[in-house]
Amino acid sequence: MRKSQHNIKPFLICLMISLSTVCQSVEILPTDKLHEHPRLFLLKNEEIQIKKKIETEKILSDVHQLILTESNRIISLPVLTRNQVGRRILHTSREAISRILYLSYTFRMTGEPKFADRAQKEMLNLAAFEDWNPTHFLDVAEMTMAMSIGYDWLYNEISPEK
């Protein structure tokens, strides 16, 4: 990833989380009355509100465009590999979060199947790793977060055969 885009990752994640807090109200429901997927950060159909804000707010438009550009770049990359450095695979799990979040967001905003397909490919690849390095809890936690976002945001796109 280019250095300028690498520095914007934390900003983008914070922006996504802050947008989701504006878009949704907090309501704890019994498990038999949960919202439909997606339900993490950005509920079903809340893309509509974000799209409206993108049209009127330049900073959001710029961030949105950066995410679309990065998602298109990710599609051309090989899938992630489990590469342990010292005690950790943290660089892999953090890249997994970025890729799956960007691809899932881009699919939700554009409806283009190529982004959902690539996110699923990354998820299946991560699931096939020998492990997520259970000796380092943060590796496992971040892999779980990446998979959770992808599963939730792409729930209706994931086929049972995969």
Image: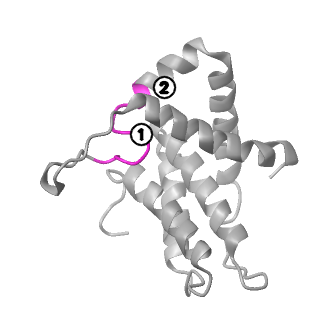
Assign a secondary structure to mark 1: loop
What percent of the width, then of the height, locates residue 137?
A: 57, 78
What percent of the width, then of the height, locates residue 66?
A: 70, 35
Above/below status of 25 relative to 101: above
Above/below status of 123 relative to 110: below
Q: Which amino acid, by three-letter code, is at mark 1?
A: Leu
Residue 42: which disc? 1
Residue farthest toward the right in the current orientation of the protein: 3
Above/below status of 157 relative to 25: below
Determine the residue positioned at 49% across, 68% down.
Answer: 144
What percent of the width, then of the height, locates residue 61?
A: 64, 23
Q: Earlier in the sequence, mark 2 or mark 1?
A: 1
- Left or right: residue 136 versus residue 104 is right
In space, the residues marked 2 and 1 are separated at their CA atoms by: 10 Å
Give the overall secondary structure of the magenta segment: loop
Q: Are marks 2 and 1 in contact (CB under 8 Å)?
A: yes
Residue 129 in view (yes/no):
yes
Front in this rendered view, residue 85 or 74: 85
- Left or right: residue 151 versus residue 121 is left
What percent of the width, then of the height, locates residue 70?
A: 69, 43
Determine the residue positioned at 69% across, 25% down.
Answer: 62
Q: Which amino acid, by three-letter code, is at mark 2?
A: Ile
Front in this rendered view, residue 71 or 144: 144
Question: In the rendered image, which quarter contains the C terminus?
Answer: bottom left
Assign a secondary structure to mark 2: helix
- Left or right: residue 5 versus residue 23 is right
Residue 114: which disc? none
Specify whether residue 42 is painted magenta: yes
Determine the residue positioned at 56% across, 15% down.
Answer: 55
Residue 50: which disc? 2
Q: Which residues are magenta?
A: 37-48
